[in-house]
Image (cartoon, helix red, strand yellow):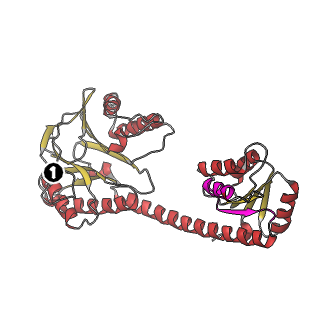
Amino acid sequence: MKELSECRILIVDDVPANVDVLVQALRGDYQLSVAIDGTTGLSTAEKLLPDLVLLDIVMPGINGYEVCRRLRASPRTREIPVMFLSSLEDVRDKAQGFEAGGNDYLVKPFEILEVKARVKSLLRAKAYADAVKEKIAYELQIAREIQMGILPQAIPEVVGGTGLEAHAILHPAQEVGGDLYEALRLPDGNLVAIMGDVSGKGIPAALFMAVTTTLLRAMAPDSPRPEDLLRRVSDALALHNPHGMFVTILCALYDVRTGRLDYASAGHPPAVLVRDGIADYLPLKPGIVAGIMPGLSAPGHSVQLQSGDLVVFYTDGVTEAFDMAGNLYGESRLLAELAGQSGLTAAATTDAVLRSVRSHAGDCPQSDDITVLALKRK
């Protein structure tokens, strides 16, 4: 945990006498910075990220209430504790300070001992909170590394000898997420390709994703058809699912001898087939999502892949990516992008889709995991 002597306090007050008193009282115990008006205080806080702001209310330009509101509105400064030091002593003034986001309020003239005690209390609370956040961030980073390690790491090697080339990308919206993809070789040499999306986000979704991936890997060798695998996995998930989570799964089986692709869906969006410069969704009657109840029934479908055909699996983090105006990336945009990439490799295709989605989103934060898996018949 951070030592209190390393903490920086920003004093924002336009009265030099008040600043001098505070500096004399706190110098030597903490690192200090001073701003003589609200505008300077905001810019200094954004630059230095102090551990505490001592804030006057009545100042030229913007007042202390507005300074506090702007501090709370900025992602960089919203967690900095603020203590108002003001001559305004009416209850309504104090209430306005707390409504603006203040953590404490002390009326002038103040006792130095009380100021020092409250400053120490606020700094201790922030240091503890920062230490907890660092620990959580570290654990989430480890969780992310573990989750990414669960995913298949060498898909091009997995599909070697199948007549296919393959590539996948997964970019979680948070440190960990609920998307999954898989490529498995069966004992008979055929290939199983899977795309999944767990309900929710964060750690619960990541745990459910890990369980789902484990079940898919364990059950795939003994499931002759995609619809059989989906049913068995869904039954196993539903057996121990106290929080009613679910996962959408698109499962495909590629016959290396005939080039036929059998597929079925548990509530997942259909894959896109790109052939001769034309992109369109593969016909699909999706079953219900997996994990909710036993006995899932997912209709099976087949398509004969030709030389040069490209099949693209994706999660709705692609089509439901927003731009700053609230516009979705959408299915039509995805089809147009893939139609224009029909001559590319599988790896170039996934990269092109990711670039297109990010170009559409611009500065809008990613709201969902983005996952793409491409299979191309050589």
Q: Residue at x 35, y 37 (%)?
A: 349
**Is 108 in the magenta?**
yes
Q: Is residue 378 visible?
A: no
Callout 1 amino acid: Pro
Chain part drawn in magenta = 92-109
Q: Quadrant of the image for the N terminus?
A: bottom right
Which residue corresponds to mark 1?
A: 226
Give the x, y percent position of residue 216. Answer: 23, 59
Question: Between 57 and 192, which is closer to the camera in this rendering?
Answer: 57
Query: Residue at (80%, 55%) from the top-left corner?
Result: 34
> Hey, which quadrant is residue 300 in on the image?
top left
Q: Quadrant of the C terminus?
A: top left
Q: In the displayed structure, does residue 246 sit left or right of residue 125?
A: left
Please give left or right for residue 10 compared with residue 335 in the image: right
Query: Would you say 133 lies left or right of 87 here?
Result: left
Q: Whole-percent x and y of residue 99? A: 61, 55
